[in-house]
């Protein structure tokens, strides 16, 4: 969806939250005229100037140096789980399996944190699979083994010094809010939202 000049007259009527969402997520859907009007509205309301800077940045393709700057900033941020800053952050995908009689469900979710926190969450996810995943035939044992193998592979990748594919995807998909946090001077430890990635899948045997 592209926001054309017709949206400009409605900007004063929008809530601050709507203005912020448009600045952080609008990107190429905002025409140059809308971006200029949005910057004026942001200034009029006394909202953070970084919002206008993000709207400007997202209206142009993010180049490699800009992306690397954000990647490095997030990796060096405080761990959102324990608050530590000793090791670079990473993201992994974990799976849990739960079986009840003839029903088995799998839940995939992302964890962003330092290596120690990632290892702890991977251990808990695997323990959950071992306790709750087996109790349905035939899918319970099969999906449990697949989930345990997947968790082990994810943990091994996260212990590597390089960012995982999930970390890169997280930054790319949340580039607007992350640039805003970086430019507004927010330190690490801010809340990172991963819920949009969460997927659930149920199987009935």
Image: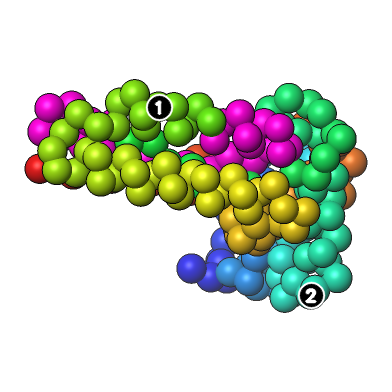
In magenta stretch: residue 196: no
Q: Position of residue 73 (x, y in %)?
A: 84, 50
Query: For residue 3, what is the image quadrant?
Result: bottom right
Q: Position of residue 126 (x, y in %)?
A: 45, 33
Q: Residue at x 47, y 32 (%)?
A: 125
- Horizontally, is 6 left or right of 81 in the view? left
Query: For residue 62, what is the image quadrant?
Result: bottom right
Q: Residue at x 49, y 44 (%)?
A: 151
State the residue in front, 190 or 137: 137
Residue stretch in magenta: 98-122
Number of marks in the rendered image = 2
Residue 27 visible (yes or no): yes
* Spatial separation of the CA atoms under disc 1 and disc 2: 41 Å
Tell me the SS state at disc 1. helix
Q: Closer to the observer: label 1 or label 2?
A: 1
**Image colouring:** rainbow
Tell me the SS state at disc 2. loop
Q: Which residue position holds label 1?
A: 128
In magenta stretch: residue 120: yes
Q: Position of residue 153 (x, y in %)?
A: 53, 51
Badge 2: few (under 14), some or many (20 or more) residues near its Cα, within 10 Å?
Answer: few
- Horizontally, is 153 left or right of 189 in the view? left
**Mark 1 vs 2: CB contact within 8 A:** no
Q: Is residue 80 above or below residue 67?
A: above
- Horizontally, is 62 left or right of 50 in the view? left
Q: Which quarter shows the C terminus?
A: top left
Q: Residue at x 75, y 58 (%)?
A: 162
Badge 1: few (under 14), some or many (20 or more) residues near its Cα, within 10 Å?
Answer: some
State the residue in front, 160 or 22: 160
State the residue in front, 110 or 11: 110
Q: Which residue position holds label 2?
A: 63
Identify the mark nearer the N-term, 1 or 2: 2
């Amino acid at each position: 969806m592209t926001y054309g000049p017709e949206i400009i007259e409605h900007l004063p009527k929008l809530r601050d939250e709507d203005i912020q969402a448009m600045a952080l997520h609008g990107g190429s859907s905002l025409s140059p005229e809308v971006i200029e009007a949005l910057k004026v509205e942001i200034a009029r309301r006394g909202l953070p100037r970084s919002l206008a800077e993000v709207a400007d940045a997202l209206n142009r393709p993010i180049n490699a140096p800009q992306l690397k700057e954000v990647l490095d900033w997030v990796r060096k941020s405080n761990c959102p789980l324990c608050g530590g800053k000793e090791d670079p952050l990473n993201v992994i995908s974990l799976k849990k399996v739960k079986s009840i009689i003839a029903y088995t469900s799998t839940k995939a979710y992302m964890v962003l944190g330092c290596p120690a926190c990632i290892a702890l969450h991977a251990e808990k996810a695997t323990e959950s699979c071992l306790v709750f995943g087996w109790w349905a035939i035939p899918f319970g044992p099969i999906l449990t083994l697949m989930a345990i193998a997947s968790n082990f592979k994810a943990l091994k990748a996260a212990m590597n010094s390089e960012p995982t594919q999930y970390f890169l995807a997280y930054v790319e998909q949340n580039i607007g809010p992350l640039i805003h946090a970086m430019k507004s001077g927010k330190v690490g430890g801010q809340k990172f939202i991963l819920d949009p990635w969460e997927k659930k899948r149920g199987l009935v045997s």
